[in-house]
Image: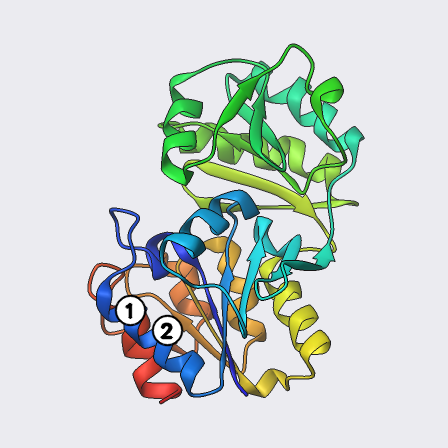
Amino acid sequence: MKLLFADMDDTLLSTDKTISKKNLEAVRALIKAGHGFVMCTGRPLYSCKVLAKQYDLMGENYYIASYNGGQIVDTCSMKELVHEGVSYEVVRTLFDEAPKWQLNVQTYNDDCILVEEDSEYIKWYSTRIRMPYKVVDDVMGALEAEPLKCIVAHLTDHAALERFQAKVGPKLSDVTENLFSNPVLLEFGSKKAGKGRALENLCDILGVDRADTVAVGDEANDIDMIKKAGLGIAMINGTEDTRRAADIITEKDNDNDAIAEIIERYFL
């Protein structure tokens, strides 16, 4: 058994946030051949399940590593295999600091995104990942448990996010890692999480040699996963840093069936 760890946005998903027919057929052929498929994404589990149900990507040998690997679920049983969240203290710090920089900030319960202020950004994000959001007076009182991640975001000012990362990120570095999942989203998760750690954790749980893994992605939060896989692949539409970290780069982009290209070449 081999495992394919695939990022979702701008990798498995086309620009319009759909999965192409050819990619879908290739994933099903991979499963039929006895291999495993892992959606490995910064998205919350709720959003992943919407897509997995829509495209029937659930059942034996289908896994979801959501929240940048903070949560891993076996879709056959919906059993949670890994859970690594961030502390309430980290949440409060980010919700206090981000508005000072005119940045948006959010976290999650299982069934909704939590924000303390409404904005055009959160409307965009909620629509993009197909998950509802809730505006609350105090995020700490609204949380049902320590969340799996927080996001600091801005739709247009990537430089402000970089400044926030440089200034605030180090204050939380003992317990969190922060990476961009795209230029709009700066994601804060547990140091025990991350996509590379997700690959290691799932291999250990399933007894799969890491040499028998392939990982593909396009952004900074994919780099560790790409480096730790037996074969690390960057999307041709990926960032320069991601392409530099990979063993190979796809010939096709996310709008032209790159996942099918990978599966046909390395799994079938």
Dot 1 falls on a residue whose secondary structure is helix
Q: Which residue ends up furthest to the left in the rendered image?
A: 256
User: What residue is pinned by disc 2?
Assistant: 27
Q: Position of residue 17 (x, y in %)?
A: 30, 48
- Residue drawn at point x = 48 percent, y = 28 percent: 132
Q: Position of residue 71 (x, y in %)?
A: 65, 54
Q: Position of residue 115 (x, y in %)?
A: 57, 21
Question: What amino acid type is highlighted by mark number 2?
Answer: Val
- Residue drawn at point x = 68 percent, y = 60 percent: 79
CB under 8 Å between callouts 2 and 1? yes
Dot 2 falls on a residue whose secondary structure is helix
- Picture quadrant where residue 267 is located: bottom left
- Residue drawn at point x = 33 percent, y = 65 percent: 235
Q: Nearer the viewer, residue 113 or 15?
A: 113
Q: Position of residue 166 (x, y in %)?
A: 60, 36
Q: Nearer the viewer, residue 110 or 76?
A: 76
Residue 249 shows up from this direction: no
- Picture quadrant where residue 230 is located: bottom right
Q: Which residue ends up furthest to the top in the rendered image?
A: 137
- Residue drawn at point x = 66 percent, y = 52 percent: 70
Question: What amino acid type is highlighted by mark number 1?
Answer: Asn
7 horizontally vs 76: left or right = left
User: What residue is pinned by disc 1?
Assistant: 23
User: Could you tell me which quadrant the N terminus lies in?
Assistant: bottom right
- Examine the rendered structure and indicate whether residue 39 appears above or below residue 15: below
- Examine the rendered structure and indicate whether residue 225 appears above or below residue 124: below
